[in-house]
Image (spheres, helix red, strand yellow):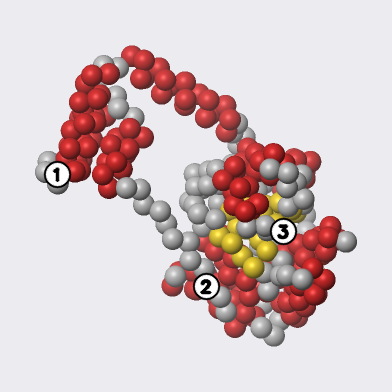
């Protein structure tokens, strides 16, 4: 929570130029540079990994694996033995990491991170800023028009555990006047879509810092459509190469916000798009 509070204060100082960062809010370069980016086909990688695991399982000694996993489970339950040593033995018999983890999870359970967000920190630092006030005004206007505040789900999908930026967005948008739902880490697109529908949000904001945007975002849009809620607006923020923006727009994304985006400006753009759509 201390990290989140410090991050929100830092973002507010950057957005108001109290903190100056060359290339972010000072001495910006208007020229666009075509940077070569390594393209990874996430679907192909996933399928290849699944095939490799299936080959490993087909060629290993199933009895030795079962005994090794049972020993891990017994040690977890009784508190005797060395779990690391038993995990190494299981790995030597070609047990997968998932199987080793599951053997311990059966007794210990699985850790579920508690997604808490704070409010007021961003607003306290930026309250007199004109853009922030404009965003608050639009939020109030939307509430008067629709009878409720704009609601957004901030989603972290796949194996992307970098949630600092997502939490800054959640904190800042709450201060602007949004109702903010924070999805858990490591959601699947289907889980995020289901949460968005259950919470009746207006927007799903996908925070992407692990290069999964070309796979996970279209899957989220498809999941929303399957649930009959293609009306829910999808936006993307994070480290997304500019050459991928058009791909996301064609998939159905309403807006993309890259590094250096001023939070209040993003909120204004989203609210304007939302009010146009609602009309």
Q: Position of residue 65 (x, y in %)?
A: 25, 24
Q: Position of residue 236 (x, y in %)?
A: 67, 52
Say few, some or many: other residues with alpha carbon within 10 Å of mark 3 (under 14 / 14 to 19 / 20 or more): many
Q: Position of residue 6 (x, y in %)?
A: 49, 73
Please report contact status of discs 2 and 3: CB closer than 8 Å, yes or no.
Answer: no
Q: Secondary structure at mark 3?
A: loop
Q: Secondary structure at mark 2?
A: loop
Q: Residue at x 57, y 79 (%)?
A: 120
Quarter where residue 147 is shown: bottom right
> Circle 3 sits on which residue?
202
Mark closer to the chain start, 3 or 1:
1
Quarter where residue 122 is shown: bottom right
Q: Secondary structure at mark 1?
A: helix
Nearest-to-viewer mark from 1 and 2: 1
Q: Residue at x 42, y 57 (%)?
A: 113
Alpha carbons under labels 2 and 3: distance apart = 21 Å
The quadrant of the image that shows the N terminus is: bottom left
The quadrant of the image that shows the C terminus is: bottom right
> Circle 2 sits on which residue?
118
Say few, some or many: other residues with alpha carbon within 10 Å of mark 2 (under 14 / 14 to 19 / 20 or more): some
Q: Residue at x 20, y 40 (%)?
A: 84
> Circle 1 sits on which residue?
78
């Amino acid at each position: 929570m201390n990290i989140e509070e410090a991050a929100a204060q830092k973002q507010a100082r950057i957005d108001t130029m109290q903190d100056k960062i060359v290339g972010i809010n000072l001495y910006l370069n208007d020229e666009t540079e075509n940077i070569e980016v390594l393209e990874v086909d996430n679907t192909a990688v996933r399928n290849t990994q699944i095939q490799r695991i299936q080959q490993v399982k087909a060629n290993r000694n199933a009895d030795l694996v079962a005994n090794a996993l049972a020993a891990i489970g017994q040690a977890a339950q009784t508190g005797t033995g060395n779990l690391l040593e038993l995990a190494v033995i299981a790995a030597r018999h070609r047990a997968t990491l998932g199987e080793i983890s599951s053997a311990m999870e059966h007794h210990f359970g699985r850790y579920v991170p508690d997604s808490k967000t704070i409010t007021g920190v961003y607003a306290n630092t930026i309250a007199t800023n004109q853009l922030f006030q404009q965003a608050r005004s639009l939020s109030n206007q939307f509430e008067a028009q629709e009878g409720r505040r704009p609601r957004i789900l901030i989603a972290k999908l796949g194996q992307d555990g970098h949630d600092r930026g997502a939490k800054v967005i959640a904190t800042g948008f709450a201060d602007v006047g949004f109702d903010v739902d924070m999805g858990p880490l490591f959601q699947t697109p289907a889980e995020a879509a289901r949460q968005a529908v259950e919470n009746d949000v207006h927007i799903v904001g996908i925070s992407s810092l692990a290069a999964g945007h070309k796979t996970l975002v279209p899957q989220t849009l498809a999941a929303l459509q399957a649930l009959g809620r293609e009306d829910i607006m999808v936006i993307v923020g994070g480290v997304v190469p500019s050459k991928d923006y058009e791909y996301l727009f064609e998939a159905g994304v309403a807006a993309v916000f890259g590094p250096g985006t001023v939070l209040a400006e993003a909120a204004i753009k989203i609210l304007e798009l939302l009010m146009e759509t609602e009309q």
